[in-house]
Each structure stands twice: as C-alpha cells, then as structure tokens.
Image: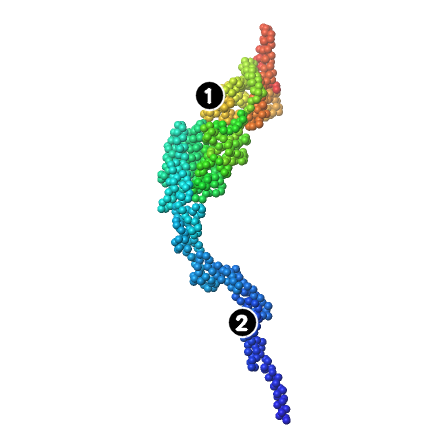
Amino acid sequence: MRATWTVLILALILSPLTVQTQTSCPMGFNSVDQNCVDEDECEEDRELCGENTNCFNTIGIYYCQCKEGFRSKAVNFTATDSVTCRRINECLEIKDICGPNASCQNTMSNYNCSCKNGFASSTGVEIFRGHDNITCRDTDECKNENVCGLNASCINTQGSYYCVCNAGYALKSGKSSISGQEEQCEDICKIDDTICGNGSCLHEASGHYCACSAGFTNYGNKTGRCTELHCGVFKDVNNLMEKFDMVQDDIKQLSESCLKLSGSEDSKDLNGEDLLTVLLSMIDQFLSAGSVKDNRKISTFLDMVEQVLRFIGPLIKTPRTKRFTDHTELELLVHTGSAIPQGLKTLSSKQAKVDIKMEEAAGNPSSYPEFTTVSLLSYSNLEESAGDFFSGMKKNESQNFKINSKVVTISVSNTDTKHLNEPVNITLHHLDHSNQAAHTCVFWDSSKDGGVWSDRGCSVVESKLNYTVCSCNHLSSFAVLTALYDIESPFELQLISWIGLSLSLICLFFCILTFSMIRSIKSPRTTIHLHLCISLFIATLTFLAGISQTQNKVGCAVVAGMLHFFYLAAFCWMCLEGIQLFRMVVLVFNTNFKTSYMMAGGYGVPAAIVAVTVLINRDGYGTKKYCWLNLDSIWSFYGPVCVIITVNVFFFLVTVWKLAQKFSSLNPDLDSLNKIKAFTITAVAQLCVLGIMWIFGYFQFEKETKAMTYLFTFFGRLQGVMLFVMHCLFSKQVREEYENILSQLRAPRKRTYSEYIYSSKANVSRSTQDTGESHI
C-alpha cells in the first residue's frame, strides 16, 4: 500500500515535466515526434511577403526580398515590416547600362538591350543585358557595292553611311549627299548649263572644268565661274596719256596682265601684289603731275582705277591688305571660298570709312565666282582737279559748291553695283572744319556731260563739324560738297552800289586833291591819308568798271589781281597810320617815318602777297560770276587783313594807354595830347569803316545772310564818303582852307599888303604844327 502511494506520488510529479518537454520548441520550429523541426514559413504561406517579392526560408526564420526590377526601402525584410516593393526603370536610372551604340528597353520585371541601327552585337544575339559582356560594333554598309548606285561613292560613318557624287557629277536637287539610291548623280554640265557663267562646261576624268570665253576669266580656278574682265577700259586711256605720258608703261603692263587673264591663258605667273604696286605707282604719277581740269580725263582715270582694282583683287593672297603711298591710301579685303560671305565689314583710311554688307559685295548668288573683294582707295589731291564740275547738281543762281573732303573710290567684285539692295554707309572727313554750311553727299557720274558730280542715290545720314556720313545705293567714287552762296544782287542793292560807288569816287577824288594840293596841311599823316585814298580810289574805279567782266579770263584775272593789290594796300596804309600814332605818343624825337619806308610798307607788302598768291595758285583769280579771288585763294586776302587789323588794334590800345599816362602826368602838354587824342579817335573810326565791311563780306558765303549783304553793300560802297567826312569835313584846318578857296572863287580881288602878311603868318603858324586836327 505504501509502495502504491509512492508510485502515484512520482507519477504526479513527473507528468508536468513530460508535458513541458513535449511543447518547448522555439518560434520557427515545430515539434515532430518530440523533436523541434524548422518551420518553412515560405512554403506554408506563399503570399507571406506580399506582391513582387521572393521569400527565403532559413533555420528558425525567413526573410523577404524584392524581385529583380523592383526595389524597397530595405533589402531584407519580413511580412511584419510593412515594406512594399516598387518597380524600377534600369534604362533611366543606370547610365549606359547597355554600353555604347545600344538601346535599352525597360520591361515589366527587367530590361533588354539591343544594338542601334547600323550596329551589330559582337556575339550575334539581338537581345542581351548589360552584364552579358556584349558590345555593339559598326556595320560597314559600304561593303555593298551597289548601295549608292552609279557615279557616286559611299562613305561609311559610325552607325550609318552617305553617298556623294563623283567629281563632275551632282544631284539635281542640289543636295550635297544622299543615303541609298533615292536620287542618282548626273553629269554636272548637263544639270546646270550656267555653272561656268560665260564659258563652256567640259568633262574629264578628274571632273568638270570651265573654258572661259574671250574677255572672261576664272583666275586659274578650273571649276570656277567665268567673270567678265573690262580690259577695254585701257583703250580709253589714250587721251589720258596725251598729257601724262609718264604713266604709259604702267598702263601697258596693267593692260597686258588683264589680257593674259582673259580667256584660257595660264595666269599662274601673275602676282597680285606686284600689279597693285604698279597701279598705285601710276596713280601717284598722275596726281603729282598737277591739276587736270578736264572732266573726261578724270572719268577715264576713275573708271580705269575701279576696273583695275576689280581684276587685281582676286589675285591678292592675303585676306586684308593696307597700302600707303605719297598720294594714295588703300585697304583691300579678299574672301575666297564657295560659301558666300555674310555680315557687315568696315574698311577705313585716315580720311574716309565705308561700312558694307558682304552679300552686296558678292553679288547675285547664282553667279557667285567663289571670291569676293572690297577695296577703299583715298586720293590725296584729286579734289583739286575735280572741283569745278557741278552741272549734275540742282542749285539756285546764288549757290556754289566746293569739295570739302578727299575723293574716294569704292570697288567690289560684284559687277552690278548700279542699284544695291542694301545701301552702303560712307564716312568722309571734312577738309575745312570751320565751315558750318550744309553738306551734300555726291558721286562722280561718268555718264553725264563727260563726268560731273551728282547726288543721285546718295543722302546725308549725319553731318558734324568734322565729318559727314553718307548713304548711297550704288558704288563709284564719292566726295562731300559744301554749299556756298554768292551775294545776291537785287535791284535795290545794285542801285545802292552804283550810287554809293559814284559818291565814293567823287569824295576820294576831293580827298586826293586836298591832301596833295593844300600845302598848309602836309604832314606824314596826310601823306598816309593821300596814299590810302589813292589805293581806295583805284580799287573802287576798277571794281566799278571790271568786277563783272568775266568774258575774258585773262582780263578778269588782271582785274582780280588789281583789286587784291589795292585793297591790301589800303589796309597797309591804315596800319602805317596806327604805327605812326604809336610813335608820336611813345617816341620824343624822330617820330616820323621816312617816305621810302612808308612806300615799302604801303605798296611793297601787298605786291609781295599778290606775287606769292600768283605763284602758288595762278588760277585763283577770277570766278564764274565775278573778277575776284576764288574760294581757293580767298584767304590770301582775308589772312593779311586779319593780321593788319590785329596789329592796328594792338597799337591803338598801347597808344590809348600811353595817352592816359601822359594826361595824368604833372605837366601835360594838353594841346599836343588833345591833338593826338583826336588823331587816334579818327584812326580808330577809319579802322572800323574799312574793317567792318570785310567782316560783313565774310558772311556772304553762307545761306540766309540778306541783312549781312545790305550791311556789306552799304559800308563797302560808302567808304570814300566816310573818309572824306572824317579827314576833310571834320578837320577844322581843312574846312578853313575850303572856306578860303571858296571865298576866292566867289570874289576874286587883289589882297592888300597887310592881308597878305596876315595870311602868310597864319599859314606859317599852321605849317609848324602837326596839322590835320579832327573834331569828331
């Protein structure tokens, strides 16, 4: 019984231990036959990890991974991690995943690689992946001999090919290349019968070539278009060589070179640089020979220069050339190649600048000769020869023109420059910067009246004191003109002139009689006044009789020379009076001039000025309307006049200053000082009368100066009257002499002894003084 209870007690104690042993397997394991066996969670639940995942079982646990082509936040995860696998695009995210020359196509769960057109895989498979170590290699389509058809060559490229026509063949479409046989290459001479221009297109093994007709050339470029050469321009220079035979050799060399270029002769031995040197040498000799004054010769010269620059340009090898000589300045621009140049180009010299679009210089694209040239040539003194031919300008009767810039020639390879699509801008610097008159842009028109300046097709874009910008729709030789205006002479002005000059002649005649016949007033000052009046009398008489006698050029030049001399002489005598007054105030002794010195200053100085003017410009005397100095020589008068007026003003200022000092001295000689003061006032008034006239005369070259014209006429025609009033009527002593003469004429009788003695004493008393006191 006791043993039974012992067994029962042990059974009760061991039964829980047995149950505990059977259920103690860890998570991920199952108890099988009292053994813990791994549980395969992936097998038990195939959707355990979710969509687009792979489940991997391990001992006691499992983990999930996204399928290929999908991605999650974590590489390994479990179902409890709430991770989602999203699709990825390898073609976008991995650069060059397929390698060069291959295309990537993304699939639902992966990607595929395939070679691009024109390439093949190194193993021959069509579909592969980047990690398969397969490359795409170029396929040479040109191995197929018939891929391009006849008269064409195949050129292989990476992944493709193209076909080009063989030499001498081309595509009708104008394309430079094709792929495959979409179009056939044909003989270029048959496709375009104008390809050679004025020449014949021929075919040879190396391709086509152009045989130029006589008078045309392609400058040795066998396939180039034939352009015209104007070698006939050299035949027109015979009249040019009549006077300028020194340029005969240069013209002959240029003519032979032009003829050698013409037709099919070999021109490889022609050197453009040497020909350019010959041309500039010829121009220098022509311009250094003096003024031409023949518009037909100028037309021939300018036409020849323009044509020579055109045929020399393509022979120059350098893209931009600059040359300087004694009488010229040249800039030459050369472009070569089949492509027509584009854009704006600028050529310049010291006196000019041109802005031109290269498309205008090249000309019509259909006749482009595969070169373009632009040249700007400035002449140093051609304006002197071409300065008288303005019949092509519209002007009124009082208007004249003067060239105020250097003449420039602009030449381009385009032979049709009579009307450009886009105008060129030409900047020309002024020769005279002080002239603010209106400026006009002109060109040399050889087709009208043998050659004249014309403003047709040209306009002023901008005009400043120093330069004018012109816009012209054609090319030629250009310049800028200044418009000058002659003095208009309506009836009232003519009436004032005739009456005033007649009165002046009468008054000057009385002045001459007074200063030469009345002995009581003789002094150095009256001698100066005498010769001043003689100079003005002869000048006024010459002006009245011959100023408009322009029919005889020699006679007109003599009249202009006399006016030049005697007007200058009047100013010189006026200057001597100012110096005489200065000596009277400053010097105590020997205050008077010697007569020989006065004659040398009064007549010698103007004679020297006139002689120098004749030597420098013998054509400077006489204009089309008046016998006076022309515009080229006008400063040979105004220059000395300005100097004389300046010297006189200086001496008058010093004289007044010295007079003021003497008046303020302790013991002034008031009689002498008052007399000199009166002399000075008279001399200053005389300077104003003579000087103001020519100041007003200067403004006659500008437009709208009617008031100045009347003032000039008034002061100029009444000079003699004013001098008579100042030096005779305002002089007390001269008036007394006039009264004596008049009284003797009215009642002639014998004077008593006492009257004779009184008159003689009075004359002696007056003659001992420096007479001629004026009271103005």
Q: Which tag is nearer the camera, tag 2 or tag 1?
A: 2
Q: Is residue 628 above or below residue 30?
A: above
- Residue 145 image point, x, y percent: 39, 54
Residue receiving disc 1: 554
Q: How many numbered callouts?
A: 2
Comparing 703 with 184, the one in front is: 184
Q: Which quadrant does the C terminus fall into?
A: top right
- Residues at discs 2 and 1 in contact (Cβ within 8 Å): no
Q: Residue at x 62, y 92 (%)?
A: 3
Camera sees residue 389: yes
Question: How many angstroms separate mark 2 from mark 1 (CA)?
Answer: 129 Å
Residue drawn at 56 percent across, 82 percent down: 33
Residue 398 placement (x, y as % from top left): 54, 25
- Label 2 SS: strand
* Residue at x-position 37% and y-position 42%: 202
Amino acid bearing label 1: Val
Quick one: which residue is furthest to the bottom in this view?
1
User: 652 or 271: nearer the eye?
Assistant: 271
Q: Which mark is residue 61?
A: none
Q: Is residue 257 visible?
A: no
Q: In the figure, residue 491 lies in which quadrant?
A: top right
Q: Quadrant of the N terminus?
A: bottom right
Q: Is residue 1 above or below residue 679?
A: below
Residue beneath label 2, please? 56
Three-letter residue code for mark 2: Phe
Q: Where does the image place residue 741, in percent across and percent down from the top left? A: 58, 11
Residue in the picture at 45% in, 46% down: 173
Viewer-proximal residue among 558 and 476: 476
Question: Is residue 446 shown above or below 79?
Answer: above
